[in-house]
Image (tube, rainbow, N blue to C red):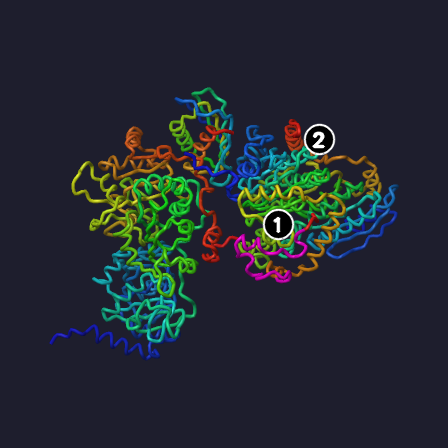
Amino acid sequence: MSNLLQPQEADWYEASARERVAGLLDPKSFAEFLGPEQHAMSPHLAQFDLTGAFDDGIVVGRGRLDGQEVFVAAQEGRFLGGAFGEVHGAKLVGLLRAARDGAKRGGPLAVLLLLDTGGVRLQEANAGELAISEIIRAIVEVRSAGIPVLALVGGRAGAFGGGGIITACCSRIVVSEHARVSVSGPEVIETNKGVEEFDSKDRALVWRVCGARTRYLTGGADRYVKGRIQDFREAAIALIPYAPPFELATLKAEQRRLAERLQRFGDCHDAPEIWRKAGLPQPERIAEITDDTFLAIQRPKGADHDAR
Amino acid sequence: MEQFQVRGTVERRAVGHRHQAITGVNASGNLEVLVERALPEHECLVDVSTAVTGFRGIWEAVIQEFFARSSPGGLRFSINDGGARPDTVTLRLMQSVRLMETEA
Amino acid sequence: MTLDEVLASLFPSGHAVERGPSGTLHGTAKVEGQGEAAIVGIVGGTPLGVDGAILLAGHVLSVVEAGGRAPIVVLVDTSSQNMARRDELLGLNEYLAHLAKSLALAAVHGHRTVSVLFGHAAAGAFIATALSSQSLVALPGAEPSVMDLPSISRVTKLPLEDLTELAKSTPIFAPGVEPLFAIGAVAETWAADEPFASRLAALLRQPVATSDLRDRIGLERKGRLLAQQIAERVATEAAAHAWR
Amino acid sequence: MMDWQKQRSERDARLDAGSRHASGKMVAPESAKALFEAVIRPGDRVCLEGDNQKQADFLAEVLAGVDRSRVHDLHIVQSGIVLQAHLDLFERGIARKLDFSYSGPQGAAIARALAAGKIELGAIHTYIELFARYFMDLTPHVALIAAVQADRDGNLYTGPNTEDTPTIVEATAFKSGIVVAQVNEVVDQVSRVDIPGDRVDFIIKSDQPFYVEPLFTRDPASITENQILMAMMAIKGIYGEYGVRRLNHGIGFPTAAIELLLPTYGEQLGLKGKVATHWALNPHPTLIPAIESGWVEQIHSFGGEVGMEDYISARSDVYFTGHDGTLRSNRLICQTAGLYACDMFIGSTLQIDLAGNSSTVTEGRIAGFGGAPNMGSDVHGRRHPTAAWLKAGREASDGQTTLIRGRKLVVQILETFGEKMKPNFVETLDSVAMAEELKFDLAPVMIYGDDVSHIVTEEGIANLLLCRGPAEREQAIRGVAGFTDVGRARDRKAVEALQQRGVIRRSEDLGIDPLAATRQLLAAHSIEDLVTWSGGLYQPPSKFRNW
């Protein structure tokens, strides 16, 4: 007897990087590059008395999404917080460069980044940081070659630090309620600026500031989904045809969009202040309501855009 | 950090035809197991790399018990451990053998 | 070095650089034998927040929109990203990404982009400014850092002395120009006794690489031994199958 | 002539002294101290209401602050010693003697106070025992209780957390004692009468609502895969096997896992409607998915649970509610239901020995008992049969065929190792050493080994009903004790033989796929999922919010 859940029915947040990939893509279509059997592991962790991971915390490869070839990379948020190290980062760089080079020969349809990361891996901070910069540059090259890059965020590590920046470099962003997308983590801000600035223990506050609902309503994410892998899959399929091109007009529109956000909401310190200004109903309740109720909310003007 | 190998001889070849599988995550209190069909059919081997030192005796007991319980002949296991308890190690090893029975 | 000293040494034929809000600056300057360059920057050790990032990106996009191929020089003496609840609430990640993308777009449009680091830069601000140009130059006094050693010590629970000792044998985690040069992040370091103007002119005369070579440079400098090889192995496996 | 009315006269005198600080039954909070000094006499037995959930915390603070030249040497008779103020009573010499049930968070402080001679301990009871003794030899002279509302006649509405209050008041009021209530609000008409006004002598409105601990809220996010594996084994190998319909669950994570697996794994096994339909249980939030999936017919509760109020009111077919719509709980009655009308208790413990005795006493902590020992004991007075009870009895009967007495299923579910690799299986319980040190007549045992029918660990299920003799029992226990010293010292052959006989059943014997033991199988992964299941009716306390 098998009690196994169908992979796409599974919950994104609970799933491992590999389970997410398996459920996101068409069944049994995934082929991994530089798989765990090749032991491409970080050589830098042992000096910190840490054991590594056979895939250095990121799964990269190709597969089919709704019948079409795509590249996919998935970070494992539970291994060292999904953080970028030398090997981890280089695997993603290699994947993106392959997508860029493949563009001339017609593939892939898109690159899907399943981000789940606290940012740079401290034990190899310089290599991780530079890898992030290389990834950003590679994303730009892939997008310039006409291939959309999608960020899917809904894991326990969120997308922090360079991971938050990478997210916003993508053509389209899909989030579920668990997602937090930010640069400085709440703990980091609290450590540096004090608990008055940011009480990282106040989970509700953390989600109001960094969470998916705030990102979605302000235009920092394009699609908000319920938490099943299936939901991410459907959103990715739906969004790929609508990815904005990487060109001057897009960035000029993003410049206007972000400047306008700053102008309208620049004096706000908590999400409900923004919702009130944006004229949303019951601003204090937005964090509380169920996903269905939330999804029924009309997004504020400008939150739905091609300016990314 | 500590690294060691545990070898065993078992009665039966592990079921299935899959070449390799991986399960679990190297996180605090957890571990990842990479399993490969790479040995003669009555042999098995576990390579352990663990963040916590001083528990080699328990590891060996857990692994030998697993060999006896699951008879994973022909399989080579590689473990990256983040300080998992014996029960979690057993569960992962059993899961990895089950994965080798399934289609890739 | 002060900003004025840096400007004077880089652009002895003169410049028109204005200070803006949030530690930003922008303007133009004459580069030896190269015509006019666009200048943007964040200086004074100012943390890079939403306000600064949007201004800088706006300047960069104006240069792109104006057309031509003027080089863009990014002067950097910042801090880390602005650590504030408000900035994060407003989506700092988008603002920093927007700046990084704008610099990348400028390069796509044929503008040679050079970051000149003469003070601090850390974490997300380092990514969005110094690391987002085609070439990063470190001047005397440059203090790039991804993560400071005390923070690494706190999180990894490794004593500071051990970390300091460890940092001597690997460039992989410690702050400073040297390790970042070794891994390929910093393209060139210019010493104070050299005229920056001629170094800049020489840099701008070099042919532009068509792709990101920093991993290859890191390998050549023996500071980052795996990245290039790993990326290539992935790309090779990826290329091994025909599309559709 | 004999005076047969001394207690009544005494009560009148106390009431008279107290009434000087009252207006009718109403006493201002600032007069509470004076009231206590007037109505409480040295040496009195006092029940200062407090259990593992609700606390008459304002009255506790006041009592801890009385003039000890006037009030001293009290004998505290209450189910929970939980607040700092409770211990202050002994530190300050206001109280001397103690009979109680549960201490939970104050377990270490109680052990220290006992060792220091600050507390003269009567006994550590199970709840029903202590309540029973209220009507025998520990009847309170004064009861200090907590309620949500009072009217001017003294009628009380306790809210969902009725808990011990009716029992305490019954014993005190009908034996000429004095009853003082702290209330959150004074109203013209109470929502419902939980305690009739003629049993209540004084009312004090406190500034803050009385404290209630959300003790029964378990965050699904903390459930581990091994707990899920154990839960699967329990559902298939015990719930399904015995067809257990009437039961009680402990508060640990393994039983929370069971609750969350009923609508998924239990459904796959086709057990819906066949098991787990009637419960003696607090309003566990983790049972919401099973209730919403139609598994549960009814639940009677010992107490309430913070945040569950609206959900309970909206599900009155399942819960016991008053005509006002809110939960009516009652600890004594629910304990009795658990004792006599449940076919199974399943709960976790911190330590278990080779005979199956278990204890939550760990080094330097006396956590007391709570409800588990009543639930987790086979009551020999039971007469009505059920299939589960009879099957368990037959298994234990060793071939006897006539007049077989049924057996309650008493299941201990625990991982072989606890936190920091502390073995949960031991040769000797810590409580034995503690009892020697503190010169107790009896070492505190949570559940006696001879009451235990099954032990479930990640290694499998040991069915102790099928064991013949202590040696076999010991090997059965060692056989599921994993890699603890106790487990490693097992007799391999004996354990294999037990497995052959089905005394020990491992996951593979039960046909459970270890690959299925993932968190994905849980019906809810987080507190937030529970809120979603409840349609927004469940409102968790902020400390459980993480979104």
Give how far across and how far down residue D213 sits, in percent: 40, 58
Please report contact status of discs 2 and 1: CB closer than 8 Å, yes or no: no
Quarter holding the N terminus of chain A is: top left
Is C102 in front, or is C205? C102
| Residue A296 counted in the magenta span | yes
- Residue D320 shown left or right of residue A294 in the figure: left
Please, is residue A238 above or below residue D508 in the view? below
Q: Chain of mark 1?
A: A
Is D317 in front, or is C26? D317
| Residue D485 counted in the magenta span | no
Q: Which residues are magenta?
A: A276-304
- Residue D458 shown left or right of residue D242 in the figure: right
Please, is residue D139 above or below residue D8 in the view? above
Give how far across and how far down residue A301 sits, in percent: 67, 56
Amino acid of disc 1: Ser
As drawn, the residue found furthest toward the top would be B40
Residue under label 2, please give it: A105
| Mark sitting earlier along the chain (2/1) | 2
Q: Chain of mark 2?
A: A
Amino acid of disc 2: Arg
Name the disc covering residue A182, or none: 1
Residue at (46, 28) in percent of width and height: B101
Give how far across and how far down residue D344 sits, in percent: 30, 47
